[in-house]
Amino acid sequence: MELCSSACNISHRAKYFVLLVLSLSVVAWIIIFPGDTVTSLISFNSTHTPVKEDGLGDKLHSTTEEDFKEDGLGDKLHSTTEASNLTTPPQKVDCPKVSPLLQGLRNLSFDSSLTLNDVVTENENVRAGEYEPPDCAARQSVAILIPFRNRERHLVYLLHHLHPFLQRQQLHYAIYVIHQAGNATFNRAKLLNIGYLEALKDYNWDCFIFHDVDLVPEDDRNLYVCAETPKHMAGGRNTTGYKMSYPRYFGGVTALTRKQFVQVNGFSNSYWGWGCEDDDLYVRFQLQKVTIVRPPIAIARYSMVFHTRDKGNEKNKDRFKLLKKTQEVWMKDGLNSCSYKTLSMDRLPLYVNITVDIGKP
Ligand code: UD2
Ligand code: MN
């Protein structure tokens, strides 16, 4: 007992000594490494801003109200709080509001001998379908979503024109091709819902462009960015004399923010085969009293590569019946009920290919 108490005393003293040495080291550490180390540890966490509901999330950090209004949408605004961290590379300045690289209306050519490899060679600055302007910070980050099956030639043409087109607009973008596996009836709208859900797993995109594979934009002033309200980009195309097909027309190419798309629960998953899935989306916005914007018809010009109706995408006989039910079902038929199985996800040089099993009607 006696022996233990003196031994315990010694061990107590040793503990106090160790504690004292530790405290002194902490004080010395703070004196030797002031500011930077501590702030860099703190600011590391602060850069991981929680994602905001509206999909513009962590972009919305700074500058003036005016910057924010351009394009009617939050431009990508850049954090100034992080600038004090000496270890981060210098921030790029915002790209100009009007890109100096735009060329306006162009006469497009479609060379049948062009191969996918040629297009890869033309676009060595694209990595896994993604691109960012090298010298400035893009004003929006945009995911291009393309529903796809058996249209390889059209995809080559589109990639050939679209990559340089988007780069001239100084956008940060990535192209996703959502490929329906198997021979069951095609479902464009469901593939686009899937593209949206999958692209969001990669990045918190500001804007989603829902894009037919056979439509090539002719004028790069038709900006692939989102606006305050849903934007229909493809007002005119060669096959209709560059005129709107009908006033409520909403097909081909549309640009929607996350907030806009979520507000209507995305597309319906129930349109199997050709027709009316685009009208259904229009009705969803109408029900929410959300108006649609369109760029001037003089620049909303597309060349549609000629095609006949695909096998497996015959006219949907039920399309008008479905369209009458939109009001009843939109809340339970859409993004929140989109079930599918991803069979593969390939990050190819020019696009991300997502092959999916979407079931059948
Ligand atoms: C119109 C609309 C389109 C859609 C469709 C009705 C325009 C310019 N486009 O296109 O947005 O509303 O009517 O469903 O108004 N696809 C394949 N493989 C197939 C079938 C379709 O990849 O086997 C994809 C492809 O991206 C194609 C899109 O689905 O561009 C629309 O199909 P379409 O081109 O056959 O229909 P279209 O031109 O009448
Ligand atoms: Mn078409």
Image (cartoon, rainbow, N blue to C red):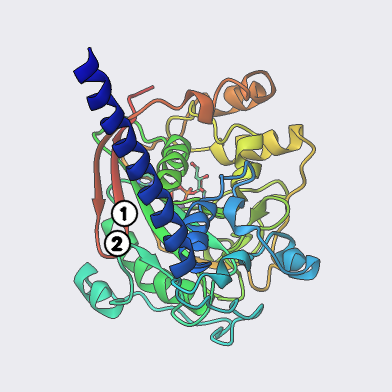
What residue do we see at 38% from left, 53% from top?
Answer: 176
The extreme top residue here reads 1
Which image quadrant is residue 255 in? bottom right
Above-or-below relation of 315 to 166: above
Residue 305 in the image, given as x and y percentages of width and height: 41, 63
Find disc 2 in the rendering and name its residue: 128
From this view, report whether residue 113 is shown above or below residue 103. Answer: above
State the separation of the CA atoms marked 2 and 1.
Answer: 6 Å
The relative height of residue 102 versus residue 131 in the rendered view (above or below) is below
Element carrying mark 1: strand
Amino acid type at circle 2 is Ala
Of label 2 and label 1, which has the lower sequence position?
2
Q: Which quarter of the image is occupied by the C terminus?
A: top left
**Residue type beneath disc 1:** Val
- What residue lies at 73% left-to-right and 64% top-to-bottom? 68
Count of numbered badges drawn on the protein: 2
Residue at the outermost front position: 2
Horizontal arrangement in the rendering, residue 335 relative to residue 358 (left or right): right
Give x and y (percent) for residue 6: 25, 25
130 left or right, relative to 99:
left
Left/right of residue 177 with respect to residue 235 in the rendered view: left
Is residue 325 positioned above or below 288 on the image? above
